[in-house]
Amino acid sequence: MALPTTMKAWQYTTTKGGLIPNLKLNPTASFPVAKDPSTQHIVQIFSTCLNPVDVKPAEAMPSFMLPKPATPGIDFVGKMVVPAKNSDLKAGQVVFGGAGLSPFAGGACAEYAIVDIKGAAALPAGVSESDAATIGVAGMTAYQTIVPHVKANDRVFLNGGSGGVGVLGIQIAKAVGCHVTTACSTANVELCKSLGADDVIDYKKGSVVEALKSKPPFDHVVDNVGNDPNLYWNAHHYMKKSAKFIGIAGEPTLKFVMFSAKVRLWPGFLGGGKRKFEGFFAQQNIDELMRIAGYMKEGKIRAVIDERFPFEKAPDAFRRLKTGRARGKVMVDVSAGGGNA
């Protein structure tokens, strides 16, 4: 089958003034070419879900560090067009996972994208395309920040339970037998409870730290928000000594850089943090993609989609993402016939 030579793709060459004003639809973008056909797939994109990592680093880093032109979008569900030679996947299979070779410009906001061999898994029967599209970055982040660090009956606190990572984190933690406490706004309390959270703290009604202090100590903490350093500096008041605090978010600002430096360099006995802190960046893993999809098939996890946008209105999807108020995932439907319920 002859492959196209061009495709439609949302692209930008600079983020001066923000990503969204610079995002342009190119109707004749070059069709992607695998630089290493043995380890890289070419996939037709049905739908992509957006993540803060699609925007925050691109807006913070110098333009020379970005591919030119850059196409955002990592999470995807789509159809295999040209499988990597070292893969067992076949042309025509529906696949899902994380697109791209750049961690900041995955390329899924386009009709076709390159996907690393580690970033694509076959869609299991019984899991919808739309649900699978939500797994990518958020699923890997939730899974990898929770499952390797906990055991059944551990007490886990997830800060930010209603965002793209949080909605999956609550359900994954429950699937492995943890007691889950989360924090969210008043509007999202019932959503978090419906996902299985045992205890929900409404940050609109008081201090999250003070609420945590009043509870039995936690075995594990994941901060999905990253906007309150006091959550970490006070961690010894509500976490066990052996517990780990994982921070996966935070604006790439001078304030956040200073916080990160303090965490690493300021010893606890001099007033610094008294619990182990780990930063995090998700890694694509086929086995873990399949495990999350398996949870979906078993009914242990349900996808939460905040809003869906047609391909032509992708900038509106990014605007919704940037409000920070999305409940679950923001989805862009790229190709007709994709993203079936």
Image: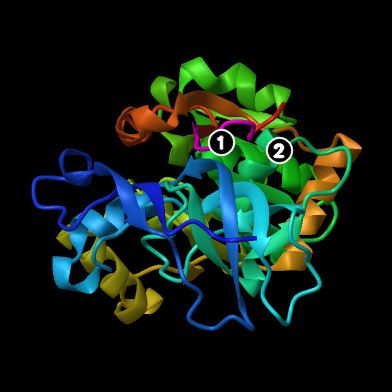
Task: Locate residue 288 relative to residue 247 in the image: left or right.
Answer: right
Pointers 1 and 2 in contact (CB under 8 A)? Answer: no
Task: Locate residue 18 relative to residue 276 in the image: left or right.
Answer: left
Q: Tell me what residue is drawn at x 62 percent, y 43 percent.
A: 133
Q: Tell me what residue is drawn at x 62 percent, y 80 percent.
A: 39
Q: Would you call the spot at circle 1 few (<14 residues within 10 Å), some (14-19), or many (20 or more)?
A: many
Residue 230 locus on image (x, y percent) = 35, 50
Q: Mark 2 points at which residue?
A: 129
Residue 294 locus on image (x, y percent) = 85, 48
Which numbered marker is on residue 117? none
Quarter-of-image position of residue 106:
bottom left
In the image, residue 155 above or below residue 144: above
Q: Which of marks 1 and 2 is in front?
A: 2
In the image, residue 246 above or below residue 164: below
In the image, residue 326 above or below residue 266: above
Assess whether residue 76 is covered by the magenta stretch: no
- Residue type at mark 2: give it: Glu
Q: What stretch is highlighted in magenta?
A: 331-338
Q: Mark 1 points at which residue?
A: 161
- For the question of whether residue 229 can be seen, the reply is no
Q: Tell me what residue is drawn at x 42 percent, y 32 percent.
A: 311
Quarter-of-image position of residue 340:
top right
Alpha-carbon distance for marks 1 and 2? 24 Å
Q: Would you call the spot at circle 2 few (<14 residues within 10 Å), some (14-19), or many (20 or more)?
A: many
